[in-house]
Image (cartoon, rainbow, N blue to C red):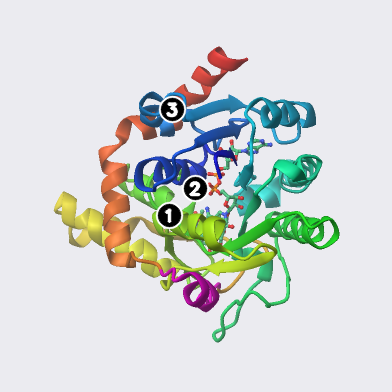
């Protein structure tokens, strides 16, 4: 792998992945980040990386639905590997407005697969980043494995399931060298504050209510984003072509426990207690339609075959995450005030 095309590298996981590859691995090649810069893409998340790795880190504003632009980037940059993160990623948005999810997650992935197929002779690997949500919902017992049946429940997870099937089909039919990872809920630095953890941290800091859907007893398996990036890189280097790998955090937790933990950390930092505690901001609101009850990952395949295990406990990961949001108020301010999107408009449109 010399010239890696990363799609969606200005998003939460993609930007952490690029940072990890360039800063903390022995990769010596070039990363070409293509991102259309939707509301969720933030070029500022990699501003220091762009400066430090001039020549080895290249950003191009490209929509994965634009076939011609994809072809140009692939050829101009002599790409040999694709790592595909770009997606519409928020379940609540997919319930209200599924169109972009169908376009980007299904058609965009299809375009990338065709691009890869056209250049199959030059292509070492197409890695597809997917989610555990394709498996649907678990009851109190059991874990998702790589052979669990697909049963997506939201327009988001259905669009990701569809993209997973296309990736599989291109491997089976055309022998495209692919790997797929299905992981659980990520958290950590640079996550857009619409997802549970950053939303709760920022709302609590501003004294706003902390909306808990339904009874708050839904369970997610929290994976620190850096652990996820390490897993993806391991799969890209040593994963068996044509295989899928489940990646989990070993941190199953009910949503209310997650929110209470964030409140405890913030109360400790701000010296709050009793009627001043952030916990008083917790508000139970109408449930998400089709809300999956529980996700839990069996990651024994990647552990046994590639020696990967999550390193971060939830206690240490959430402390680091809260601290990151406290220390990066400019990044947050620019997103929350709309300044960042205004800047993109001036710069690119
Ligand atoms: P994100 O929403 O933070 O980032 C998505 C990025 O894709 C953004 O930078 C956005 O601008 C870009 N993008 C969207 N549409 C595009 C298009 N048409 N062309 C080019 N770029 C486009 O998402 P994330 O949380 O970083 O998730 C990354 C990937 O990981 C997604 O495929 C998602 O399904 C998957 N995933 C995420 C999680 C999680 O907990 N966040 C868990 C499992 C899997
Ligand atoms: O499991 C992997 C998936 O995790 C990824 O594929 C998705 O891209 C990612 O968004 C995430 O999906 P979730 O729906 O699990 O994440 P979210 O942060 O939106 O919600 C986590 C849980 O918290 C879920 O049970 C819904 C609940 N929730 C969420 C929000 C935003 C609330 O109770 N209140 C909220 O305000």
Tell me the element at label 1: helix
Q: Which quadrant of the frame does ligand 1 lie within? A: top right
| Residue linked to disc 3 | 337
| Residue linked to disc 2 | 13
Q: Residue at x 41, y 59 (%)?
A: 227
Image position, residue 75 (x, y; %): 70, 29
19 on left or right of 136: left
Q: CA distance from mark 3 to mark 1?
A: 25 Å
Tell me the element at label 3: loop
Which mark sits nearer the N-terminus, 3 or 2? Answer: 2
Q: Is residue 110 magenta?
A: no
Placement of the N terminus among the 4 image quadrants:
top right
The answer to whether residue 276 is visible is: no
- From the viewer's side, name the closer residue of 349 and 233: 233
Q: Is residue 299 magenta?
A: yes
Q: Residue at x 64, y 32 (%)?
A: 78
Name which quarter of the figure residue 336 lies in: top left
Q: Considering only vertical position in the picture, is 56 above or below 123? A: above
Which mark sits nearer the N-terminus, 3 or 1? Answer: 1
| Residue linked to disc 1 | 225
158 on left or right of 295: right
Name which quarter of the figure residue 41 lies in: top right
Placement of the C terminus among the 4 image quadrants:
top right
The magenta region covers: 295-309
Badge 2 residue CB within 8 Å of ligand 1: yes
Mark 1 surroundings: few (<14), some (14-19) or many (≥20) residues within 10 A: many
User: Which residue is most to the left?
Assistant: 271
Mark 3 surroundings: few (<14), some (14-19) or many (≥20) residues within 10 A: few
Image position, residue 234 (x, y; %): 49, 59
Tell me the element at label 2: helix
């Amino acid at each position: 792998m010399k010239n890696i095309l990363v799609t969606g590298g200005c998003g939460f996981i993609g930007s952490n992945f690029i940072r990890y590859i360039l800063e903390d691995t022995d990769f010596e090649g070039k990363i070409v980040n293509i991102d259309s810069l939707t509301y969720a893409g933030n070029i500022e998340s990699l501003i220091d990386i762009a400066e430090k790795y001039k020549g080895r880190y290249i950003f191009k504003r490209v929509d994965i639905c634009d076939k011609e632009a994809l072809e140009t980037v692939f050829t101009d940059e002599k790409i040999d590997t694709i790592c595909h993160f770009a997606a519409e990623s928020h379940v609540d948005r997919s319930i209200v407005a599924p169109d972009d999810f169908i376009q980007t997650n299904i058609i965009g992935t299809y375009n990338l697969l065709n691009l890869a197929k056209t250049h199959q002779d030059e292509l070492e690997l197409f890695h597809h980043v997917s989610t555990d949500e394709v498996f649907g919902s678990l009851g109190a017992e059991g874990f998702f494995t790589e052979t669990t049946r697909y049963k997506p429940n939201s327009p988001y997870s259905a669009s990701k399931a569809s993209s997973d099937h296309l990736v599989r089909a291109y491997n089976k039919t055309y022998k495209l060298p692919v790997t797929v990872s299905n992981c659980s809920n990520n958290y950590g630095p640079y996550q857009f504050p619409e997802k549970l953890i950053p939303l709760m941290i920022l709302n609590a800091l501003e004294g706003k209510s902390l909306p808990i859907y339904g009874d708050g007893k839904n369970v997610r398996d929290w994976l620190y984003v850096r652990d996820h990036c390490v897993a993806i890189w391991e799969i890209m280097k040593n994963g068996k072509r044509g295989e899928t790998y489940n990646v989990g955090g070993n941190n199953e937790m009910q949503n209310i426990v997650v929110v209470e933990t964030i409140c405890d950390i913030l109360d400790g930092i701000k010296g709050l207690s009793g009627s001043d505690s952030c916990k008083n901001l917790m508000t139970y609101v109408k449930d998400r339609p089709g809300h999956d009850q529980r996700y839990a990952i069996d990651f024994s395949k990647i552990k046994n075959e590639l020696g990967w295990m999550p390193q971060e406990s939830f206690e240490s990961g959430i402390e680091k995450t809260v601290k990151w949001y406290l220390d990066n108020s400019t990044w947050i301010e620019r997103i929350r005030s709309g300044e960042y999107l205004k800047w993109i408009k001036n710069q690119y449109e």
